[in-house]
Image: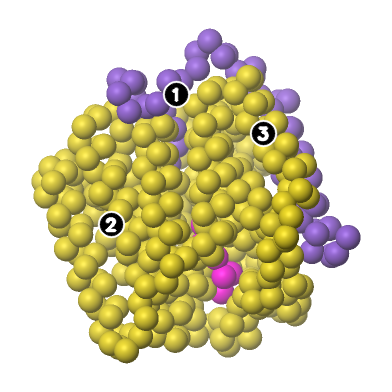
Amino acid sequence: MTRRALSSTLFWIVLAAFIGWDWSKSPPVDVRQEPPLVAAGSGQAVSGGHCSLAR
Amino acid sequence: MEPTLVASESARTDSPKGWHRLPLAAALVAFFVLLLWFVALRQAVLFAVGIGMGAALAGARFGFTTGWRQLVEDRDPRGTVGQLLLLGLAATLSMPLLASYPELQAALGPPSISLLLGAFVFGLAMQISDGCGSGTLYKAGLGVPLNMGILPLFALGSFLGSAHLDRWLALGEIAPVSFVQSWGAGSALAATWIALIAVGVGVRLWAGWGRDWIARRWVWGAVALAVLAALNLTIAGQPWGVVYGFGLWAAKLAQATGSFDAAGNAFWSQAGNAQRLSQSLLLDVTSITNIGILGGALWIAARRREASARPLSARQWLIGLLAGFVLGYSSRMAFGCNIGAMLSGVSTGSLHGWIWMPVAFAGTLIGVRLRRRFGF
């Protein structure tokens, strides 16, 4: 395994560990309150964060 | 010269067989199914959109940073023209959507002192770190060492920038301006195309008439990314963004270590931000597309046999990593990076996108000189 492949593998292991850690400490997802598949036409206000938001 | 990426691009060859990508394909499909089963169908589909974004960015080598640098240093307009085409196509798809569906949100950042300072510094730093928000992501996915190292520092900078945002805004701001709301979608779109063509003419005059100004990879990259950006808007209800997700990841870590009190911070105590901080990042729209972009770029990387890049000196590593931190911090001051502010801002009719673009380009003029000075 090349050094670059090794560092890439390490990068993905750390990322996967972070996602797993976050999942384990977060409250369970209520799949019955799932957001609509397509926001356009759903009539529901968007709840996501975006980098253009000042507040 | 790009020591970490071009060296590998120039020597890359496509693998004759794709069988070795099967484990990667299985991992991506497995993550899609996990999202589908345990989180939400929308998040699974957004992950797929993110994979497409990463594959398009890496496959077309659609680098915003490189395109600007080639325009400045080589008078090569092809990358910048590709970016202008992307902005126009994305606006053509997005503005009618925003006008038709009031629940969809535009990328509306406030014109402010913070925006001016942040965009300038971002444009400068992205030349040193050799990647903007999307560039850092897709190059990290491709396995470029500097960009993999930059990613966590970008996240830290993005988090700290958001935590200090109220102080930067106190320097002076006006309310966000939406051209779609003010003029209607048709007029806003016409004005956007006229402005983009005017910029294109300026680029053409700078580059000279004898040069090629369209390249196939920039065109297909622009078309693919415009469609995917519109899909993101349609599904998520908000434009494509990158840096919010980074800041959220670092904020979660800071909170977990007890070094950050979100309840006492102006930005992270806001209801929406506090909610995203407390729930799984797999429910966050931007985080999911970011993970997808990394996966899509990895998919492209697995198809190529890369030659090893020219190694960086310890000094170059230090400067590159510092630039990555500054990149993250300034992207929050500027209300987005090339994606969240420039692409999403311009294509959804936000004035702040049109302020971001020339100011960041002014920063790039300094950045390319500093890049040369540091021997990148």
Q: Residue at x 72, y 51 (%)?
A: B18
Discs 2, 3: same chain: yes
Q: Position of residue B85 (x, y in %)?
A: 32, 62
**Image quadrant containing the N terminus of chain B:** bottom right
In the picture, residue B341 is in which quadrant? bottom left
Using a 10 Å C-alpha cutoff, classify the residue at mark 2 as few (fewer than 14 neighbours), some (14 to 19) or many (20 or more).
many
Q: Which residue is tagged 1? A: A37
In the displayed structure image, the side of residue B254 where residue A53 appears, left or right: left
Please identify, in this view, whether the residue under mark 3 or under mark 1 is nearer the observer.
3
Q: What amino acid is at disc 2?
A: Gly
Q: Which mark is residue B88?
A: 2
Segment tinted magenta in the rendering: B128-133
Colour of chain B as rendered? yellow
Towards the viewer: B76 or B320: B76
Using a 10 Å C-alpha cutoff, classify the residue at mark 1 as few (fewer than 14 neighbours), some (14 to 19) or many (20 or more).
some
Q: Which residue is tagged 3? A: B29
* Magenta stretch holds residue B80: no
User: CB of mark 1 within 8 Å of CB of mark 2?
Assistant: no
- The chain coloured purple is A
Q: Residue at x 50, y 85 (%)?
A: B369
Circle count: 3
Is the residue A1 above or below the residue B239 in the image? below
